[in-house]
Amino acid sequence: MIKSQFKSPLFPYLLLLPQLSIVVIFFYWPAAEAIRSSFYLEDPFGFSSTFVGLDNFRDMVSRSDYVATAEFTIIFSVIVTLFSLAIALLLAVTADRVLRGASTYKTLLMWVYAIAPPVAALIGIMMFDTLVGPIARFFQALGWNYQLGTNRFDTAFAMIVISIWKQVPVNFIFFLSGLQGIPKSVQEAAAIDCASSTRRFWTITFPLLAPTGFFLLIINITYSLFDTFGIIDVVLKGEPGNNPVTLVYKVFLDGFRGNDLGGSSAQSVILMILVLILTVFQFRLIERRVHYN
Amino acid sequence: MAKVVIDNVRKVYPNGTEALSPSSLNIEDGEFIVLVGPSGCGKSTLLRMIAGLEDITEGSISIGERVVNTLDPAERDIAMVFQNYALYPHMSVYKNMAYGLKNRGMPKADIDTAVQKAAKLLHIEEFLNRKPSQLSGGQRQRVAMGRAIVRDPALFLFDEPLSNLDAKLRNQMRIEIRKLQRELGVTSIYVTHDQIEAMTMADRIAVLNTGKIEQIGTPAQIYHTPASIFVASFMGAPPMNILNGHYNGNGGLEIKDLGHVAVDHKLEVTGDIQVGIRPENVEIHRKEEPHTIPIKVDFLEELGAGRLLHTTIGSTPFIAHLDNEHQIDGETVFAHLPAKALHLFDASTGRRV
């Protein structure tokens, strides 16, 4: 590694300044502002604010709609994460058998990932629309009176399916490259050692994919918690009504629709802590446990 | 322990290239066969077909009494040692060795006995709890061997197992593998591109070139009576000298740029011939004598145990091996090519005549 010496000890800091200022202005400052306002009660027009201590937090956890939203968020995240990982893994294993290094095919499979979440949701709505959506019509033909936007469960179903569909390609690509990173000779040695291909998958391929899997697990939890905002917003057409929302969406609703800046800040502080825990978890536990070479 | 019969086996890849033209090879029980040849000659393809890692296009392979063409690799009762060892990186050495046995449903106690025995044989007992990434190349090689041994297979397959090791370790492992194979008496097929490995390890060698078996024979047969120019020049270091010549049909052999050489037996072909002579069979004299030709010494290569004299005859490079007592002064020496040491090949087919 090349080590260069700077004449002035301040010069390296000057070089860091642009990056640092971006981080401070766009990350730390808003975060600090959110934490500060979570302790204040603000009047809806933003003229005055009163320090209320932990009242916003107390109020938040005692409200049944918050608890319901938290519960839905957990269910939503677990289902989206599990299914988008499982479907992607299944697809990757199947694809790995037939294409070793056929990159055009891979690129094609990757395309869905390039679609922005709201656009993905728009496409999803077209599919799930109660009146014209082919999937909704299909369900209705099967006897399930599918009602997007009216029925709580049906709306949640559409949100989850669209979120999974949007995330499968990126997982697929990571799994596929993980699979192709497993030396061919190791697979062949396993083929000589083990007659059952299912057993081979669980004892050799799957453990060797674990680093990829753990990385994707964190990425997917983060995705389902936060990045699905656009999908949810479009599916709900901005009007949740009786339909379920996730915690992030509730922050937006309470803060910008309900003008409860203090309460919404308190919610976002909780989410911030959640992200912090996930990040620490990712760096500490996972990177240490799943490391081979 | 088993005989292996390779009967007219052919390999054609889906894109139409023929990796191996129909080849046959009978391997005796307990025999150590080396498949040798340059890269792309089909030796690995043949090995992989025996292992079941490649489909057989035509012909049949049997191990023991069973035709294994359609059997899965795991059902062929074989063990294979790979070039890059192919150890399972997430398993300890012990688990690497036990994996195959566990999958066959062997009781835990029996697995333990087998693994401990193999580990002792290979001196890797102290590494049993380590992961492959914590081992050196030589140790990984031993573990790969151990994984093959514990399975107690009918057939060992080696795919260039020593080519990732440094020269010193390679010589050591070469001897160890051979000793081990003799002890265990398991039929073995060993693929290498290294002719020294082939010569030193094999009971019999099969030399392959461009998808064909050129010659099958003991190391001595291969070395002393090569069946083709390819075998002659591939086996032996430094390689055999090959010169152009002409045979007129009645004992007169004319070597280009060298002159007339008497051959004692009558050849079946007439016309252009290629003449080979091993460097150690060239006799070098300081003074001119009957049946010698003057050659210019380009340079001498010191080997310690001898020296190699490099020259060119016409435009063909030519090497002669000199003993240590052979003193050379001056730039010109006189070479004698003994008729009985000459190997004659048909210039058009490359086959021995």
Image (spheres, coloured by chain):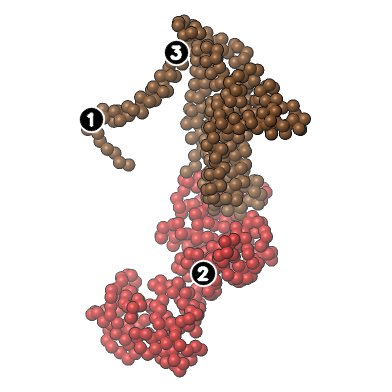
Task: Please give the residue where the numbered disc 1 appears in the rendered image.
Answer: A8
Query: Which image quadrant for residue B78?
Result: bottom right
Q: Do the residues labelled 1 and 3 touch (CB within 8 Å)?
A: no
Q: Nearer the viewer, residue A216 or B153?
A: A216
Amino acid carrying label 2: it is Thr
Query: What element does badge 1 sit on?
Result: loop
Whether labels 2 and 3 belong to a single chain: the reply is: no
CA distance separating discs 2 and 3: 77 Å
| Front label number (1 vs 3) | 3
Residue B152 in picture, x, y percent from top left: 61, 57
To the question of a shared chain for discs 2 and 1, the answer is no
Tag 3: amino acid: Arg
Give the secondary structure at mark 3: helix
Q: Mark 1 lies on which chain?
A: A
| Chain that appears brown | A
Query: Compared to B117, does B212 lie above or below?
Result: below
Q: Name the residue under label 3.
A: A36
Q: Position of residue B280 (x, y in %)?
A: 38, 78
Assess disc 3: are there few (<14), some (14-19) or many (≥20) residues with their C-alpha within 10 Å of its C-alpha.
Answer: some
Give the chain letter for red. Answer: B
Q: Which of A92 and B266 is in front in this view?
A: A92
Q: Could you tell me which quadrant the N terminus of chain B lies in?
A: bottom right
Q: Which of A54 and A146 is in front in this view?
A: A146
